Image (tube, rainbow, N blue to C red):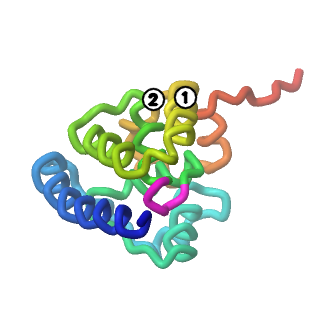
Amino acid sequence: MKKMRVQFLLFIYHYTQKLYRKYFKKKKRQWQFTEEQLLLFEKDSLGRKLGEFYKQHGFTMIRKMENHDVHHLITGCGTNFEDEVAMQYLLLGNGKLNAHLLAAIFLGTLFLPEYLKIYIRAYQKGKRMKPFFHWDFESLLWQNFDHLKDFIYQKQAPVFY
């Protein structure tokens, strides 16, 4: 039964994602890097980690949706459907608000209510994090991934006097 619910949600997601990119990402340009170029970044950089993410999962970049994949890296959210919904909850907690996000949350909760506790924890996690949903991660690909993640999670760096 869960498989049928997820297949239905995936069908809706693939259809609405194209509309979302067309109407809500009109002014956003796609990144100027390929998956292969990302693998050439410094070992500990965000760019390299993203390239490894694509390679590990067998994914390709979806134009104008590249930040979404960075959100997976930063939040630690997986790529199965219930994790995608949890990430939307996390982003809502982080301050992001748009029709596509609200629709994903509504439908994900309606069709996969058994994950509600996970969704609520994800929302709370997003509230604790520094707002990052609006960042342009393409300009941060050279940054050290762990430092960037620590900053977002508001971890304090040790100070040596």
How many residues crowd mark 1 within 10 Å: few (<14), some (14–19), many (20+)?
some
Q: Is residue 85 magenta?
A: no
Looking at the rendered structure, the kind of residue marked 1 is Gln
Answer left or right for 20 relative to 46.
left
- The image's mark for residue 44 is none
Q: Quadrant of residue 91?
A: top left
Point out the stretch of residues depicted in magenta: 78-82
Answer left or right for 156 relative to 73.
right
Q: Nearer the viewer, residue 36 or 87?
A: 87
Main SS class of the magenta portion in the image: loop
Residue indicated by mark 1: 124
Report if the CB atoms under discs 1 and 2 are less than 8 Å apart: yes
- The image's mark for residue 93 is 2
Q: Position of residue 40 (x, y in %)?
A: 55, 72
Please identify the residue farthest to the right as the structure is shown.
161
Q: Quadrant of residue 61?
A: bottom left
The CA distance from mark 1 to mark 2 is 6 Å
Q: Position of residue 119 (x, y in %)?
A: 50, 40
Q: Nearer the viewer, residue 80 or 53?
A: 80
